Image (tube, helix red, strand yellow):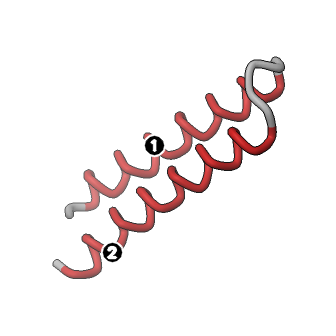
Amino acid sequence: MTDDATAAAVERFLEETESALDDYDQGYADADATLSVVRTRIDELAAAVDETAEE
């Protein structure tokens, strides 16, 4: 994964995590659902970083 790909993965993580937190703040999601989304995004970001380390 290139630096551009890593930057894109970080940007996607930040956008999707912020969206999940906004949904929680607005009452559209409960805490468990929000944490589930955030954990999934963390796992995806970690996988993207691991791919970079392997290259």
In the picture, measured across the screen, residue 14 lies left or right of residue 7, that is right
34 shown above or below 40: above
Question: Which residue is more in the foreground, 3 or 51?
Answer: 51
Provide residue 3's location: percent of width, then percent of height.
Answer: 28, 60
Which residue appears farthest toward the bottom when viewing the image? 54
Q: Where, quadrant-wise, is the N terminus in this rendering?
A: bottom left
Residue found 26% across the figure and 71% down from its top: 52
Q: Quadrant of residue 26?
A: top right
3 shown above or below 38: below
Residue found 44% across the figure and 59% down from its top: 45
Q: Residue 11, labelled with which disc? A: 1
Provide residue 13's location: percent of width, then percent of height.
Answer: 49, 46
Q: Quadrant of residue 50?
A: bottom left
Residue found 35% across the figure and 45% down from its top: 8
Q: Tell me the element at label 2.
A: helix
55 shown above or below 3: below
Q: Residue 38, labelled with which disc? A: none
In the picture, measured across the screen, residue 47 lies left or right of residue 54, that is right
Residue tagged 2: 50
Q: Amino acid at mark 1?
A: Glu
7 shown above or below 48: above
Q: Earlier in the sequence, mark 1 or mark 2?
A: 1
Provide residue 43's location: percent of width, then percent of height.
Answer: 47, 62
Provide residue 37's location: percent of width, then percent of height.
Answer: 59, 44
Task: Tell which tag, 1 or 2, sits nearer the viewer.
Answer: 2
